[in-house]
Image: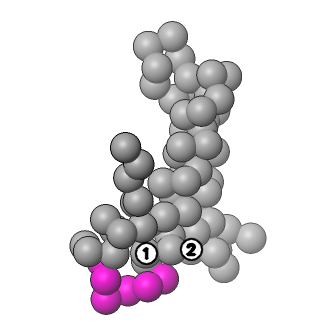
Amino acid sequence: MSINIKDLVEKEIRDDPDLIDVATSIFEFVQYLLDDDDNLTKSGNLTSSAKSSLEERINHLIMPEESQ
């Protein structure tokens, strides 16, 4: 079964299309991080490095002019 995150997010934040794109991008990046075993600890959590990458990506998406 496939989940379309964009449809789910649109229901919650339908008044702000830019926010929908940001949320979708974050979800896709998290999926990318979770797909690579090098980004995971033995217990399946994100490593510190992966968390830092995610934080940087979120900051860039939310405040693009400040992260440059």
**Residue interval drawn in magenta:** 13-18
Q: How is the image coloured?
A: one colour
Q: Give the foreground label among 2 and 1.
A: 1
Q: Kindly identify the residue that appears in the image at 48 percent across and 54 percent down.
A: 27
In the picture as drawn, the residue positioned furthest to the bottom comes out as: 15
Residue identifier under label 2 = 63
Q: Tag 1 or tag 2, which sits nearer the N-term? A: 1
Q: Is residue 22 left or right of residue 3?
A: right
The residue depicted at 59 percent of the width and 33 percent of the height is 35
Q: Amino acid at mark 1?
A: Ile
In the displayed image of the protein, which residue is found farthest to the front? Answer: 1
Check contact, mark 2 vs mark 1: CB within 8 A: no
Picture quadrant where residue 4 is located: bottom left
Outermost residue toward the right? 68
Label 2, label 1: how far apart the Cα atoms are: 15 Å
Q: Is residue 31 visible?
A: yes
Q: Quadrant of residue 67?
A: bottom right
Q: Is residue 17 magenta?
A: yes
| Viewer-closest of 30 and 57 | 30
Asked if the stretch drawn in magenta spans residue 23, the answer is no
Residue 51's spot in the image, x, y percent? 54, 38
Relative to the observer, which residue lies in front, 36 or 43?
A: 36
Q: Residue furthest left?
A: 12
Residue at 44 percent across and 13 percent down: it is: 43
Percent across and percent down for residue 62 are 52, 71
Q: Residues within 10 Å of mark 2 (few under 14, many from 20)?
A: few
Residue flagged by tag 2: what amino acid is it?
A: Met
- Disc sitting over residue 20 in the figure: 1
Q: In what quadrant of the picture does the N terminus appear?
A: top left
Q: In the rendered structure, find residue 35 and report the number of the disc placed on it.
A: none
